[in-house]
Image (spheres, grey):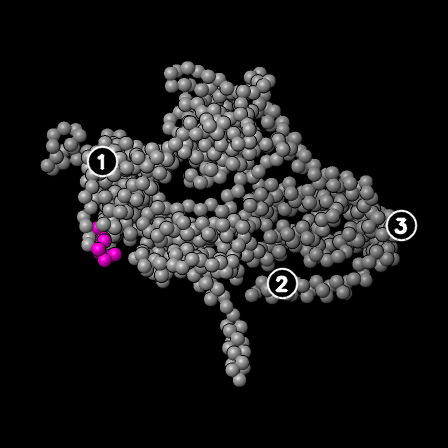
Amino acid sequence: MRKIWITAGVVAALFVVVIVAGDALSLASLQASQAQLTARYAASPFAFIAVFSLLYIGATALSLPGATLLTLVAGAVFGFGWGLVIVSFASTIGATLAMLSARYLLRDWVEARWGSRLASLQAGLEKDGAFYLFSLRLLPIVPFFLLNLSMGLTRIKLWTFFWVSQVGMLIGTMAYVNAGKHLAAITDVSDLLSPVVSGSLVILAFLPFLLRWALTRWQRRQLYARWESQRPKTFDRNLIVIGGGAAGLVSAYIGAAVKAKVTLIEAKEMGGDCLNFGCVPSKALIKSAKVASQMRHASVYGLADVAPEFSFKAVMARVHAVISAIAPHDSVERYTALGVEVIKGHAQLINPWTVCITHPDGRLQHLTTRSTVIAAGAKPFIPPLPGIETVGCLTSDTLWDAFAAMETIPKRIVVLGGGPIGCELAQSFARLGASVTQVEMGSRLLVREDADVSEVVAGALTADGVTVLTGHKALRCEQDGGEGAESGADAREKWLVVEAERTEQTEKSEQGVETKRIPFDALICAVGRVARLSDYGLETLGIPTHRTVDTNDYLQTIYPNIYAAGDVAGPYQFTHTASHQAWYATVNALFGDLKMFKTDYRVIPWVTFVDPEVARVGLNEQEATAQGVAHEVTRYPLDDLDRAIADSETMGFVKVLTAKGSDRILGVTIVGGQAGELIAEYVLAMKHGLGLNKILATIHTYPTRAEANKYAAGAWKRAHVSPRLLQWAGRYHDWRRG
């Protein structure tokens, strides 16, 4: 409210000043007063300079008309040298004050209302703000006051704004100050900037970008210089794709679809991690585990509870059967039929245009290519715990083959990690009869989700028999004979030693922690995945990497003809995101000389397939709060949904974040059965700018779970109906009754 009153006061002051000073700041008035002003300056130069500077700063800070005329006066009274110095600093100081005023009064409101939409613009200004500001300062058609105010709405640094404005306005200031020496002869201010001068300023405005373009070209030439002798005159392929996972398959498919000559190289199994180790086998396991759970709790549906009898080996055989059934979709044969040359072997980048392929029989093959897409994927991270190599551990990549060889499920399983993979595996194996302990170092499971989501998931896992240990840090692995253990190294008892914060119920110590030893028969590490960054030539070419391959907005590495997509490029490790990136990488690689496309990450959904499922798109509450985004929360509980009641699956909710005072969707979290399916409606809405009013107006079939989306929109609508409007509606109906 205070800012509103300040804004109103500033506007009123501007109005008064403009009316009062309007006649005084005219060209004719200043010309008539030139001799008088010069005399006052000669009589008291320092005082005159101070008053003039304050007047100029005030006029600029308050965005008043007349700054141009004051510049002319400076040239007429002070001369070119001192006039340039005085006006240059006064104008910059005034512009900075105007910018700061807009920042104080309006920036928070703008960010609260449009923060998510302006995120990419803010990021661009943080990176290249000096270039943009300098260019805009030079363009005569851009009003300086408008530029000052608009920059206040951004996060450009104060010092950057000051010195860039100083330099950017210098040329225009020189022109007007110099013209001011001939103030008496000026008939119209608009005539001061001739077409030649204006054209020169426009050229100068684009100079920074031309220089940056030239610098980029020079850097690229320097980058390729050491390889120039190896550059082929012709190329064997238009595109080579390294990796046959989601990103690689989509890249190859798109390339072949537009009639490019494409080679896909995969060292292991086609389909990558998703088909062979991740999405597909885990979902097959989840389904078997869910059926087992439903059998145990059949009484919920009016049936008799039954302890499921099954062969664990058969369950794992089904998992592998599902993989085999889907494998033809990603097979060598299918992609060959689509026009892709598929080579099974190990790829190595030799130079920016040449890939060396080591075939399974040891034969080497060299292929040249105009562009390359790196889609090497990621692998599970194994924490460097002392003793972990001795006791052995499984990952989401290795457990499928290891468990497939077992007749029975391991009795005691420890799952290390409280992320999506850890939660899915912990719940599934517990439902299949194992005693599962899940260890998470953080304070809760699924730390990227809101606390209420973590609470529901932890409760669901606990109900299925999982011992959830949050706030526990794994220290080491141990192996000993153990009481009752059989002789032999393989029969020795295995332990995971963890450290936990002490609670009021535990005995206190000086360290404030306690240690526990958790016995296990199988240890599953699910603490995250890391990009595959070695053993295919990144080091040879000097391509920078951190946690992933460094790429720009177009998915290019430092070599413009080498791209990266999927888990190896980040920032998301989802199969659907890898496919999404593949389109941009491939189209840019093949058609980049015509047009380049920036990768769009604005609407990325994801699902954790625990029971109940957790699906999300956009911001959640903790992210919106952390980013300072003003928002409203609408929550619809699924225990109110008819279909959820009929299915006896009422656990969960739909939570929608909207911009304050608007139906614009900022993010959605759904916890409940089939949440992964329900989230698609919100993904579509956010992608195409549809608000909750549009969802409310859409017919949803009854009785379906999708109605939850409509009811959530209805809850938002009810919360935003004007009480006064309802009051008038009541009066209208009273009148209609007579």
Q: In the rendered structure, are the residues bearing label 3 and label 1 in contact, judged by CB atoms less than 8 Å apart?
A: no
| Picture residue at 55% right of the left edge, 28% below the top | 259
Give x and y (percent) for residue 222.
59, 24
Element under disc 1 = helix
Nearer to the camera, 528 or 564 = 564
Query: Mark 1: which amino acid?
Result: Lys
Give x and y (percent) for residue 292.
24, 46
| Picture residue at 33% right of the left edge, 33% below the top | 324
Label at residue 313 = 1
Within-10-Å neighbours for mark 3: few <14, some 14–19, many 20+? few
Indicate whether residue 493 is drawn in magenta: no
Label at residue 7 = 2
Of pointers 3 and 2, the one earlier in the residue sequence: 2
Q: CA distance from mark 3 to mark 1?
A: 99 Å
Query: Mark 3: which amino acid?
Result: Ala
Displayed quadrant of residue 244: top left
Element under disc 3 = helix
Label at residue 185 = 3
**Where does the magenta region start and end?**
296-303
Query: Mark 2: which amino acid?
Result: Thr
